[in-house]
Image: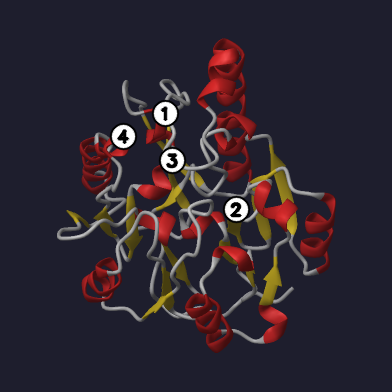
Amino acid sequence: MTDTPVFLMAEPTHYDVAYRINPWMKPGVWSASPAENRLAARRGWDALKEALEHCGASVAAMPGAAAVPDLVFPANAAVVLDGLALVARFRHPERQGEEPHFLAALSGLRDRGLLREVRQIEGCFQEGAGDCLWDAGRGHFWVASGPRSTTASVEVIAETFGQPVVHVPLATERYYHLDTCFCPLSGGEILYYPPALTAQAQRALLDHTHPDQRLEASDEDAEAFSVNAVCIGHTIVMARPPARLAARLAERGYDVVPVGLEPFMLSGGGAFCMTLRLDLSSAPVTALAA
């Protein structure tokens, strides 16, 4: 294992928007200019990888594969903590073909020493870090159920990793994964979009955070996929945010790195969706001071 942040990304070689399994997906927009969109997707993917590396991270890139265009969103591949990767079971048939590719890629990373164990979740649907976010400062998982992951997955995650979990059910198909509407930051804040969370989830958030740690995202912020962000220390890499959100985060001491990810937003994904962090540890940490 390593102290360097390590992320898995999947090459966008076969990425396109060919079907619709969430309200954001726009196959018609993609098919109107496929060559232009593929070029823009390649540029956006390269820019995201470069931004992560500029933050001091290492990126392991796996190849894309035909017939599984959403392979480019490896956040959904697995939940990873302490070197254990619990590989996803996808709800929609369109994404179930990704499972063997992610199993093979993660097993290869285990063989390279970047992971210690790889296993696949059984008995429920669970879509990886998209619905299970490790909060290092609080020492627990925020675990969602709803459009993609089933309630049974919450207990499985707790038992598998032996860590506390806080259940935060999702309220809408529009924000179908937790990572689209909820982002723990290194300073202890939670950037989140309230309408995406059920009353139960909002109560759980209130119970586990101080008022000054709750940063409510606006409709504009959420629709820009800026909540779907990668936080590394004091740097937050995200799809190009509205100016007001960037200013709010800067006031908190964060350096916001905007990346043009519009082709991936046509599938309902942003920066976090396009990465899977492999080096997360349950060892206690102190939230970073601004």
Q: Is residue 75 above or below residue 208?
A: above
Give the number of the disc on residue 138: none
Q: Residue furthest left?
A: 123
Look at mark 1 in the image and give the residue it sits on: 19
Q: Nearer the viewer, residue 38 or 283?
A: 38
Name the front one of labels 4 and 2.
4
- Is residue 192 visible in the rendered structure shown here? no
Q: Alpha carbon of mark 3 to alpha carbon of mark 1: how far?
A: 15 Å
Q: Alpha carbon of mark 3 to alpha carbon of mark 4: how far?
A: 13 Å
User: Disc 3 or 4, which lies upstream in sequence?
Assistant: 3
Q: Amino acid at mark 3?
A: Phe
Discs 1, 4 touching: Cβ within 8 Å: yes
Q: Amino acid at mark 2?
A: Ala
Which of the 4 image quadrants contains residue 85? bottom left
Q: Is residue 74 above or below residue 284?
A: above
Give the number of the disc on residue 94: 4
Discs 2, 3 touching: Cβ within 8 Å: no
Name the front one of labels 1 and 2.
1
